[in-house]
Image: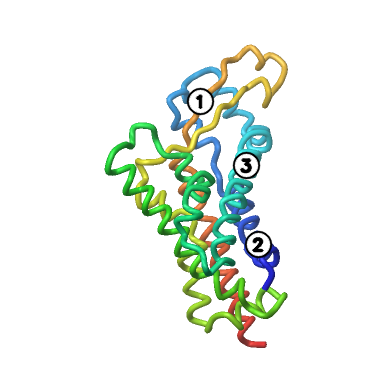
Amino acid sequence: MTRDAVEQGFDRYLSDLVDETYEAFDVAAVLRGSQSGGSRAASKLLKNSRPLERHVVRPKLREYQRTLRRQFDPVLDYAADREADFAAYADEVLARDLYWDSLRRDVRGQRREAIRERLLSRQRAFGDALAPLVAADSDDFFGAVAAAYDREAALSMVDEHFVFTTPLRDEREAFAFELTIDPGDVLGGLARALPTLDVEFTDEALRSMRRAEQRVIPQAKADIERAYET
């Protein structure tokens, strides 16, 4: 199967995951829980959460989607090159890793190295799992899935590799998802005089992403089940 076809097949579910995360995301909960929750700027934004979702939350999630797409590229390169050692791709994989980029600055030493190794191990396992799919003699995504794996292996791959929140659930306090909100950009008018807010939304990212996974993963598994029925 062509590398591009594999990328397009997985991108469908990544896009669904971002859309579902956006639908589940509670920006009001983030503002109420932030250190700036009692500020005038936060109060104004709380009263106008829909513009905030459109102008701040959705662009941020789309940014993460682009990061995950870029992260997928070297993993696919590794999957397609079965003569290569993963070490040849490790630096590029890590440089594009969303979680590595979100690692808190105070995570150092052995703990930092252990997280680094877990993130790389996760991506290496994904590349190994993808190798039969990339090598499959079919340009149809689900036809290639059925040719490359038996039913249980395909479903197991979804359960293991379509769960993007695993690193965050395993090491919740090691990562920080943050954004800066300019009330003037969101609300305009007099809000331009209000200070910007630096907000952490790690807990809400985890909650909303988990909700999205609970919707997208069953759909992906149902799609795969149908591939074995034809």
Residue 73 place in picture, x, y as percent: 60, 55
Looking at the image, the residue that sits furthest to the top is 193
| Cβ atoms at labels 3 and 2 below 8 Å apart | no
- Distance, label 1 to label 3, CA atoms, is 17 Å
| In the image: residue 7, left or right of residue 132 | right
Badge nearest the viewer, 2 or 1: 2
Determine which of the numbered discs, if any, sits on residue 7 in the image: 2
Residue 65 place in picture, x, y as percent: 61, 48
Looking at the image, the residue that sits furthest to the front is 83
In this rendering, does residue 46 appear at all? yes
186, above or below 88, in the image = above
Q: Quadrant of residue 148?
A: bottom right
Q: Residue at x 61, y 85 (%)?
A: 228
Quadrant occupied by the C terminus? bottom right
- In this view, the residue in front, 76 or 216, is 76
Instruction: Estimate how packed mark 2 is, as few (under 14), some (14 to 19) or many (20 or more) residues with alpha carbons within 10 Å.
Output: some
69, above or below 220, in the image = above
Disc 1 marks which residue? 198
Disc 3 marks which residue? 63
Q: In which quarter of the image is residue 44?
A: top right
Residue 129 place in picture, x, y as percent: 50, 70
Q: Residue at x 35, y 52 (%)?
A: 170
- In this view, the residue in front, 211 or 121, is 121
Q: Residue at x 54, y 31 (%)?
A: 179
- Distance, label 2 to label 1, CA atoms, is 34 Å
